[in-house]
Structure formats: C-alpha cells, structure tokens
Amino acid sequence: MAQVHEEAAEHDEEPIMWKLLNSVIGNQVSGKDEGRSSKPDSYNLFDRTPDFENDYGSSVAVDQSAYSPLRQSGVGLYLVNLTAGSMMAPHLNPTATEYGIVLRGRGRIQIVFPNGTLAMNAKVSEGDVFWIPRYFPFCQIASHSGPFEFFGFTTSASRNRPQFLLGSNSVLQSMKGPALAAAFGVSEERLERIVNAQSESTILPSGSLKEEKVKNERIPAAIWSFGDEMVMGL
C-alpha cells in the first residue's frame, strides 16, 4: 500500500468503511429506512456515462445526488481510466481525502506537500491501494505499456470539485493577470503563453508531447518545479 500520513489524524472519527457499510445495511438490520422497508438498489459504475472523457481517458464520479445511500455514509465514489502514457492533470481536493485501488494496468502516483515539496512518488499496479490527504496536490500517470484503471472513494458525499493546477481548466486561468505575473517575475505576455501552453484539460497526453510544446521556452522555476516533479517517465 502506498500512502502519505497526515500530520493530524482524527482518531475519534468513525472508520470510513464502517460508515459506508452501515449506511447500506444498517437500516435494514434496525428496520429503519426513512419509512421505507425496501433495500437500496445497487449502482454500477461501469454503466454510468463518463462525467469527463477525451482521447486520453475518462472519469466517473458518483455522489449522494446519484446514489442515496452515500448521503448517510458521507463518502463519494469514482472510477478513472487512463490510456497508455496519459495522466490525470495535477490537482488537489479541497473538500475530502481520496482513497484509490488499482483495478488494471500499471502507473505512478505522485503527491506533493502543500508547500510544494515532493511527498510521494510511487509505482503502483493491479491490487495496490493508495490515498491522498485533503489539500495535497497529486496526479496519476499511466505507464506507457498500457491503460491504467483505478477505482476509489472520497470522504465526502457532496459533489467533488477538484482544483486543477495544469491544463485549460486550471486555477491559473482565472488568476492570470498583472499580479500573478509580478509574483512570478515575468511579463503578462509570457505568463499568458505559459498558462495556455497546455490546451487539453483534466486528462492530459504524455509528458513527451508537453515537452515538444514548451521546447526552447525557459519556464520560471516557481511554476514548473511542481510540474517537473509530477511528470516523470516510467
């Protein structure tokens, strides 16, 4: 199991898996289900239309609005498929911790501390489990040898709103301007080129394609030090 320990673990919290199981079967045992006697239907992640899909992969997220038992458990579910060499863009979850299980293929999980230093860089394969603390930027990268598929859950049943740090939907798109350019010590024109260098969003092509796009462009270390740590060849 690949994991990063949070500095302040909440030991008095009810175990997340027990909450999930109790939400599904607990009411049946006690005979209470908000006035209903029927048990909840099952939910098939593979039958759901992807919430996001492009040439490099797809992702599905299920929250309490789609599957009511999750409302009581306080967890959400997700399923991600990446094509060979592609990656889920570096992002962070501001509302929940994420747990994942590799279903198929090989890949790499890279996590950085909130201060930008590398926290974990682990190769994973079928059957491996990993987790990412809340607020820790991370990405998942598929091996060049084949597709990479993983399933997992988050510690919030509400809609997941990941904050992407690279790509056309990154938070930098809404932050770019004179203040951000001054913070990085570059002109607004150069900052615009850097932020717009990656035209894809959410799931990105392999690092080799990105390198071709930024060839001969010296990116400020403060911006790309994060990207360099997050995109490493397998």
Image (tube, helix red, strand yellow):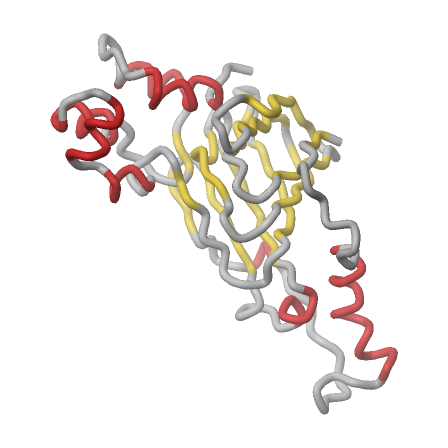
Q: Quadrant of residue 16?
A: bottom right
Q: Outermost residue toward the top?
A: 216
The count of marks equals 0
141 w.r.t. 216: above or below: below
Q: Nearer the viewer, residue 127 or 26?
A: 26
Q: Quadrant of residue 102?
A: top right
Q: Is residue 35 above or below residue 153?
A: below
Residue ID at (40%, 40%): 164
On screen, 8 above or below 28? Answer: above
Please state if 148 lies on the left or on the right of 57 as rendered.
Answer: right
- State the image coordinates of residue 213 (x, y, percent, origin top left): 26, 18
Which residue ends up furthest to the right in the rendered image?
29
Residue at 50% x, 35% y is 137
- Residue 37 coordinates in the image, percent (x, y): 77, 88
Q: Position of residue 176 (x, y in %)?
A: 21, 37
Which residue is found at the position 39% from the left and 28% from the top? 205
